[in-house]
Image (cartoon, grey):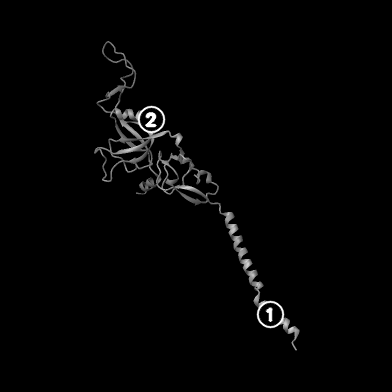
């Protein structure tokens, strides 16, 4: 005769062996819940934004679009408005207004609309060689010295004095002459676009370098006038970059 209690115990034992272990299910649920919670906390704390960075060195006056830039996902801690976000480039592109180094995040203050360009580039033949500080993006002053054969040698710095009967000049003394050919700054704050020396280390003209510079449109006429008068032109760096000044100071 079959014991009914033994039969029921056998069925219950087989059911436990065939069904999932409750402890295993609870463990899996706890692990999944922990992973989801950590992921949610990290996602909430990560405030990264995607902005543009320069794929190569950018110089003022250069027109750029998305193809000239690369995307960077960075955490700017609330300063994201200071940099050009992805999708913020108009269909006509932008114009670089300040030098931007390769790999540097692109500040919104360093670019402008193509409709508001106030500068233009000119190629200058200089009377001298350029220094090592004259590189693309460098701020420079353009000096001009008039051709001595095309300008008067000297002009009076003061009003003419009347002559006395004995031939001596009347007044406190004769005015000092001013050299009309003395070098003067005709454009300040220009920007170097590129130096046009070839790879061999000399320019087309053996006497000096050729450089392409970006100058304000308001000074173009004065610069072209100096070129037409065959003035000798030279460029002088307006400042030394911090990296170079540190090198000079440490030497």
**Which quarter of the figure has residue 186?**
top left
User: Which residue is nearer to you in this view: 152 or 50?
Assistant: 50
Q: Is residue 135 above or below residue 72?
A: above
Checking the image for residue 13, the label placed there is: 1
Give the position of the N terminus as an image quadrant: bottom right
**Which quarter of the figure has residue 119?**
top left
The residue indicated by pointer 2 is 219
Among the two numbered marks 2 and 1 on one chain, the one whose residue lies closer to the N terminus:
1
Checking the image for residue 47, the label placed there is: none
Residue placed furthest toward the top = 165
Task: Give neighbour class at mark 1: few <14, some 14-19, many 20+ (Cα, 10 Å).
Answer: few
> What residue sits 60% from the left and 57% below the top?
41
x and y, in percent, of residue 148 in the image: 26, 27
x and y, in percent, of residue 181 in the image: 29, 27
x and y, in percent, of residue 247 in the image: 36, 48
Q: Is residue 90 above or below residue 4?
A: above
Residue 51 visible here: yes
User: Which residue is nearer to you in this view: 38 or 164?
Assistant: 38
Residue placed furthest toward the bottom = 1
Relative horizontal placement of residue 135, taking residue 21 as reference (left or right):
left
> Mark 1: which secondary structure?
helix
Q: Is residue 76 above or below residue 27?
A: above
């Amino acid at each position: 005769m079959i014991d009914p209690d033994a039969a029921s115990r056998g069925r219950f034992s087989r059911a436990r062996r065939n069904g999932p272990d409750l402890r295993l299910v609870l463990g899996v649920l706890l692990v999944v819940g922990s992973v989801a919670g950590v992921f949610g906390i990290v996602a909430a704390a990560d405030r990264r934004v995607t902005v543009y960075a320069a794929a190569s060195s950018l110089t003022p006056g250069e027109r750029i679009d998305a193809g000239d830039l690369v995307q960077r996902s960075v955490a700017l801690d609330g300063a994201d408005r200071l940099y050009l976000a992805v999708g913020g480039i108009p269909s006509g592109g932008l114009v670089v207004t300040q030098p931007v180094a390769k790999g540097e995040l692109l500040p919104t203050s360093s670019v402008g609309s193509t409709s508001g360009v106030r500068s233009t580039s000119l190629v200058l033949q200089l009377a001298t060689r350029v220094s090592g500080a004259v590189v693309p993006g460098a701020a420079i002053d353009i000096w001009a010295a008039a051709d001595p054969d095309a300008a008067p040698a000297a002009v009076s710095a003061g009003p003419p004095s009347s002559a006395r009967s004995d031939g001596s000049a009347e007044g406190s003394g004769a005015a000092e002459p001013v050299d009309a050919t003395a070098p003067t700054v005709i454009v300040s704050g220009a920007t170097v676009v590129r130096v046009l020396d070839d790879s061999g280390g000399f320019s087309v003209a053996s006497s000096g370098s050729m450089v392409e510079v970006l100058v304000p449109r308001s000074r173009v006429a004065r610069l072209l006038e100096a070129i037409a008068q065959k003035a000798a032109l030279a460029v002088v760096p307006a400042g030394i970059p911090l990296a170079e000044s540190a090198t000079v100071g440490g030497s």
